Image: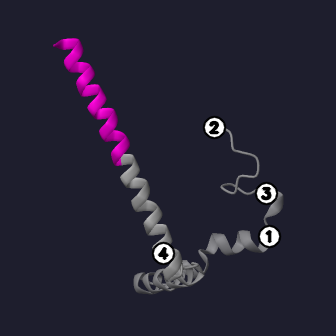
Amino acid sequence: MTDAVGSIDMPDAEDEAPESKKARKKGGKRGKKGPFGRLALFYRQIIAELRKVVWPSRSQLSTYTTVVIVFVVIMIGLVTVIDYGFSHLVKYVFG
């Protein structure tokens, strides 16, 4: 299987510093912590990522909700019309 150009899955050997190879072989900080330490680190990382999220304001949220509801109503109407048409077509063809 070929990797895409610029893939970050497997970095090139010349891109890695010798220090990073040594730290990876020893396990780094993660290998020295117990299961509760790793769990605490996981939750700290979750909270840090949630702080980066740009939450919508109340007006943006109401606008997005209105757009979604209008779209769903339009799609329901479209599917209803198509279903009605197909049902009459089937009744006409098969009697």
Taking 69 as reference, is 32 left or right?
right
Q: Which mark is residue 1?
A: 2
Where disc 1 sits, the SS reads helix
**Residue occupied by mark 3:** 13
Disc 1 residue type? Answer: Pro
> Based on the displayed image, in which of its 4 quarters is residue 17 positioned?
bottom right
Taking 62 as reference, is 15 left or right?
right
**Vertical arrangement, residue 73 with respect to residue 77, above or below:** below
**Residue occupied by mark 4:** 61
Q: Residue at x 77, y 55 (%)?
A: 12
Q: CA distance from mark 3 to mark 2?
A: 19 Å
- Give the residues drawn in magenta, as a range: 76-95
> Based on the displayed image, in which of its 4 quarters is residue 15 positioned?
bottom right
Image quadrant containing the N terminus: top right
Q: Which mark is residue 63?
A: none
The image position of residue 52, as x and y in percent, is: 60, 81
**Residue occupied by mark 1:** 18
Mark whose residue sits in front, 3 or 4: 4
Which circle's residue, 3 or 2, is located before the other in the chain?
Answer: 2
Which circle's residue, 2 or 1, is located before the other in the chain?
Answer: 2
Q: From the viewer's side, name the closer residue of 29 and 50.
A: 50
The image position of residue 65, as x and y in percent, is: 43, 68
Where disc 2 sits, the SS reads loop
The image position of residue 85, as x and y in percent, is: 30, 28
Which circle's residue, 4 or 1, is located before the other in the chain?
Answer: 1
Which circle's residue, 3 or 4, is located before the other in the chain?
Answer: 3
Residue density around tag 2, few if under 14, some if 14–19, many if 20 or more, within 10 Å: few
Disc 2 residue type? Answer: Met
Q: Is residue 24 magenta?
A: no
Disc 3 residue type? Answer: Ala
Q: From the viewer's side, name the closer residue of 91 and 1.
A: 91
